[in-house]
Amino acid sequence: MDSNTILVIVEILALLCLSAVCIYLILVLMRLRDMLLGVEKDLKEVTTRVVPVLENMEYITARVKSITENIDDQVMIVRDSIGSVKEIADNIVALEQKVQERIEGPILDSVAFVAALLKGVRTFFERVRA
């Protein structure tokens, strides 16, 4: 066998190996394509399922915001009401003090007068009986 023949055989073997590698790469690329198609299908499925969930989340977030604002408004109303009740209570206490200041003296004087009058009447009747 001469060197040309060996060289031709080696070239044929190299081409066969190269062909085998190409066929293997083609098979690997086909599997990769199938995997990517599966991933694409899964992503589409996830996307179709996620969109309604995100819409619900948006609705829920809007409702929570609305409820929170409503609670804030109600708290402000309650604070105002408590302030009004406190003011009314303060006014009632002030009125009570004014009434007490104006009436207490004359009433005590009247009670003292009636007590003295009764004491005088009792003393009179005791003296008359004796």
Image (cartoon, grey):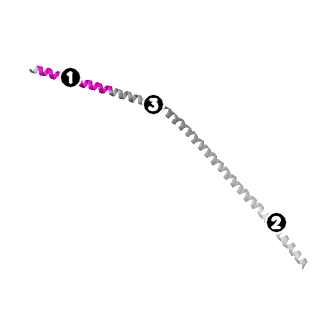
Q: Nearer the viewer, residue 109 or 52?
A: 52
Q: Nearer the viewer, mark 1 or mark 2?
A: 1
- Disc 3 and disc 1: Cα gap in Å? 46 Å
Dot 2 crowding, Cα within 10 Å, few <14, some 14–19, many 20+ = few
- Disc 2 and disc 3: Cα gap in Å? 91 Å
SS class, disc 3: helix
Residue 81 in the magenta stretch? The answer is no
Which secondary structure dominates the residues rendered in magenta?
helix
Q: Nearer the viewer, residue 66 or 36?
A: 36
At x 18% / y 24%, what residue is drawn? Answer: 14
Residue 25 in the magenta stretch? The answer is yes
- Disc 1 and disc 2: Cα gap in Å? 134 Å
At x 73% / y 58%, what residue is drawn? Answer: 96
> Seen in the image, is 67 located left or right of residue 125?
left
Q: Quadrant of residue 90?
A: bottom right
Q: List x then y, in percent, for residue 111.
A: 81, 67
Quarter of the figure with the C terminus: bottom right
Q: Nearer the viewer, residue 17 or 84?
A: 17
Residue type at numbered disc 3? Thr
At x 14% / y 20%, what residue is drawn? Answer: 8
At x 44% / y 30%, what residue is drawn? Answer: 45
The residue indicated by pointer 2 is 110
The residue indicated by pointer 3 is 47
Q: Which residues are magenta?
A: 5-30
- Name the mark on residue 98: none
Q: Nearer the viewer, mark 3 or mark 1?
A: 1
Sequence-first tag of 1 and 2: 1
